[in-house]
Amino acid sequence: ELKEEFTRILTANNPHAPQNIVRYSFKERAYKPISYVDQMAIHFSLNGNMILKDSDEGRRQSIKLSAAAKKAPVETFAVTSEEAEIKGEESTENTQPAGEEEAERSGTAEVAEAAEVEEPPPPSVKEQKLANQFNFIERASRTLNNPMRERACQSEPTPCKNFSATANQWKIYDAYVEELQKMERSKEKEKPKAQIAKREEEKKKGRKLTSLESQSDDINKISKAAKIMERMVNQNTFDDIAQDFKYFEDASDEYRDQQGTLLPLWKFQYDKTKRLAVTAISWNPKYKDLFAVGYGSYDFMKQGQGMLLLYTMKNPSFPEYVFSSESGIMCLDFHNDHPYLVAVGFYDGNVAIYNLKKATYQPSYKSSAKSGKHTEPVWQVKWQKDDMDNNLNFFSVSSDGRIVSWTLVKNELVHTDVIKLSVEGTTMQGPEGLQLQMLGCGTSFDFHKKIDYLFLVGTEEGRIYKCSKCYSSQFLDVFEAHHMAVDSVSWNPYHLKVFISCSSDWTVKIWDHTIKAPMFVYDLNSAVGDVAWSPYSSTVFAAVTTDGKAHVFDLNINKYEALCTQLVVAKKKNKITHIQFNPVYPVVIIGDERGHVISLKLSPNLHRMPKEKKGQEVKKGPEVEIAKLEKLLNLVREPESKA
């Protein structure tokens, strides 16, 4: 085994050389492999400076070196003689004559010797060895550089085609004709689809509205599932608030005699409404957790766009519906029988109707200058019963002094002026001796709950007009109610004779419309922005003031003071604008000038029901509420009759 031979053949091929290099051949227009590959591998390379003697450069350098060697001894001698002279000069001056004599003697001696001896041959110049270039002390090291690799590719040239054509009027005309024919064909194809969609809509109109969104196609089904998931997540996030809303009852009310509190629940806000004020709030009559909020501005020097948002208490983080408008929204109202219709009044005097069923952000109906819009801001709108032809209609009041009835006839709004708020004794002298009648500025109104034709109108001058739909030229009665603008007026939901009003003169007044003087007057020490009756009791009402406080009264418990006066908005620059009771739950919602809506729960003392007596059943219903308020009014009337 040790003597066995193994043959190894050494070749000069480079194992690292690539064998599959191809290059593009422009002649054949294809990539061709290269047959010849450079196999040389350089392991070491050094640039030297050794030159052959026989070469031209070597001869030139040898001549230069020999010439330099001949000149070298003469120069050294000259330098030494000069140095001697310099040294002689630098020696002492006293020895100068002796030096000169010695020089003369040596000079004569050298001349004599030169004459006697023959001249010697010139000395041979020794060849100088070149310095060894590799013999050096300084050393240096250098790291290896990574080998560079080049990679290239060339794409195939794009195919080119030459196209040429001439254009004239006839060809352009033919092209337009073809385009028009295509458009007509596409319209004909769409017609049957539109007819099918109309039939489906007619079928859906016969069905009852079961939800706020249609579930006809897959996208809406997905959106509904996503909305349910969002509500579940929000309910988990705000679980503490949801538990308080459903179950919490303030136990400390048992120890507070005739006092109550408001528990803050959810806060509703939207990024795009931060600089807008809450100008209107209304609960949906069918879906008790849904309410609409109108946004605008009460600063008449800074008017801009408005927004209409619909929130639900099931999802306080984001609104269910969002509508934007060019002008600020000042009021809104839900239809009682068709809860998907919202009537809206704008700052520019227009009124509009939004249909929540339709997937559009524009109002379904809107007034215009031709259709008799108001010339001043619309302060309040109210839906009324359908007219004789079963057309939907609503009323509006504006600062221009007109009470207008709007009727939905086919696809447009038709207006009818019901009454103009003319003010007695305020005629102006016009041109050419004409007498001009001044109109009052309407700010709020409300229709009677039982008597269909009867309604009240509050004005900017502080008067309240009792009007009838049947009389357009005169008022049934005029109340000198307040010293400043009447911000809100509202009939009691139970008692047929009682209504309430509030004003910027800091007062809230309760009236019997058959008596000129107010029955109750409450001074709240700040301008009152809004007042509302509670839906569960004829004697409970709430008011909000511009100093950020909410006041809740119950006349059955305390006729003189509020049961609850609580600060709701802490910021000085912020003001509360509106308040509304929920129709079912003991909850109020309050809006402010920063675009926020806050929901608060009434404590047990603020929505207390009569206690059961032993052996007697507690009577409930509107008759009980009417009797309760009538009893209070009789107590007020008796001292007046005696006087």
Image: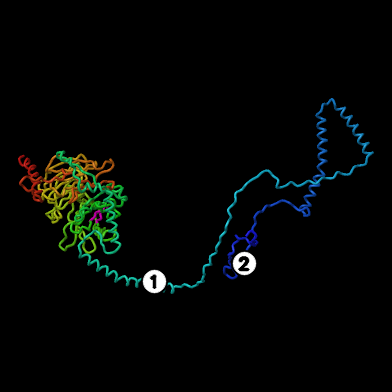
Q: Does the magenta segment cover residue 315?
A: no
The residue located at (36%, 71%) in the rendering is 183
How far across and how far down the image is residue 129, in percent?
77, 46
Residue 603 occupies which quadrant of the picture? top left
Q: Which region is colored magenta?
A: 343-351
Left or right: residue 201 compared with residue 124: left
The residue located at (20%, 65%) in the rendering is 206
Left or right: residue 46 compared with residue 204: right
How far across and how far down the image is residue 184, in percent?
34, 72
Q: Nearer the viewer, residue 456 or 260?
A: 260
Observer-side mark, 1 or 2, equals: 2
Q: Earlier in the sequence, mark 1 or mark 2?
A: 2
Q: Nearer the viewer, residue 416 or 148?
A: 148
Label 1 neighbour load within 10 Å: few <14, some 14-19, many 20+: few
Left or right: residue 13 compared with residue 643: right
Q: Amino acid at mark 2?
A: Ser
Image quarter where the N terminus lies is bottom right
The residue located at (71%, 45%) in the rendering is 135
Q: Nearer the viewer, residue 395 or 370?
A: 395
How far across and how far down the image is residue 451, in percent?
11, 54
Label 2 neighbour load within 10 Å: few <14, some 14-19, many 20+: few
The residue pinned by badge 1 equals 179
Res 584 seen here: yes
Q: Is residue 463 above or below residue 206?
A: above
Q: Does the magenta segment cover residue 348?
A: yes
The residue pinned by badge 2 equals 35
Q: Nearer the viewer, residue 26 or 161?
A: 26
How far across and how far down the image is residue 550, in percent?
21, 43
Image quarter where the C terminus lies is top left
